[in-house]
Amino acid sequence: MIVIDSLTVRFGGVTPINDMNLTMTAGSNGLIGPNGAGKTTFFNVLSGFVRPAEGTVTVFGDELLPMADFKRVRWGVRRTFQTEQAIADLTVYENVLLIEEHSGRKSSTRRADVIEAVEFVGLGNQIGRAVGTLGAAERRLVEVARAIVGHPRLVLLDEPAAGLPEDETEKLGEIIKQIPDRTGAMVVLVDHDMELVSATCDEVAVLDFGSVIASGKTQAVLADPLVMRAYLGDDERVQA
């Protein structure tokens, strides 16, 4: 369970997250909203890249924000980014190993952990290839493997399917759906592809102007008129 209480982030005169209150209980959770709603800022807070002005975040009963960023990795926070982070000249195995080495796991389990993560995303036959020689969809799978290696507790996926064709997005969705059962981790998915969110997330929350405007079961939230107005940007929303 993730409990966010009164979370506020300020950058000078800008407040990208404004008194965010939310509880996530499902294995897979969507976090959606228009561009600039505060979704990536929220991930940066959880990862330790941004220090909030106010608020707390409790995950599985542990207060996350007082932890140093490297301790969060050892605790079990993993994430992907909108831009690929894998090193093109290194192999798939080496790229995933880089993350596992910082997980705090015993060195005796590293090889097995890496192979398990790579095989889980379907790249077992590509494990020795340089990432730079892979196609776009395969490189995205490397990013997911890096996010689930070493028994994570919280996996943050920031637009993992951006730019992928529909068939590759569906394959990625099938993998994302399995993460909670296969790893025991909670997943928070940020994506603009509502079909992907619907297919992978039991619950979803919607951010708009840094505040939660709706949360709950995915289909009910996506049908909420307030959510649709937030995405359409109609006159009523602009005037609110």
Image: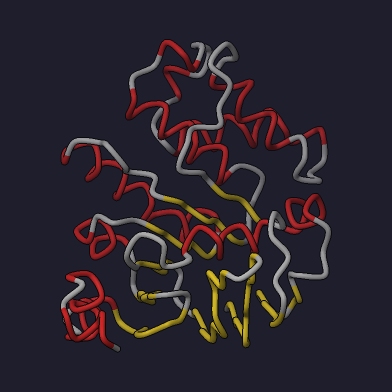
**Above or below, comparing residue 139 to residue 102 in the picture:** above
Q: Position of residue 139 (x, y in %)?
A: 42, 27
Residue at the image point whose x is 82% and y is 55% from the top: 71
Q: Quarter of the image holding residue 194? A: bottom left
Residue at the image point whose x is 39% and y is 54% from the top: 178
**Above or below, comparing residue 27 to residue 123 in the picture:** below
How many marks can you see?
A: 0
- State the quadrant of the C terminus: bottom left
Residue at the image point whose x is 63% and y is 72% from the top: 9
Q: In terms of depth relative to the viewer, which is nearer, 211 or 58?
A: 211
Left or right, residue 68 beside residue 183: right
Q: Position of residue 216 (x, y in %)?
A: 35, 84
Left or right, residue 62 beside residue 79: right
- State the quadrant of the N terminus: bottom right
**Above or below, comparing residue 58 to residue 6 in the picture:** above
Q: Position of residue 47 (x, y in %)?
A: 66, 56
Q: Position of residue 38 (x, y in %)?
A: 48, 66
Q: In terms of depth relative to the viewer, which is nearer, 133 or 119?
A: 133
Give the color scheme: rainbow, by chain, secondary structure or one colour: secondary structure
Q: Quarter of the image holding residue 234? A: bottom left
Residue at the image point whose x is 61% and y is 57% from the top: 44
**Above or below, comparing residue 77 to residue 8 in the picture:** above
Left or right, residue 55 beside residue 215: right
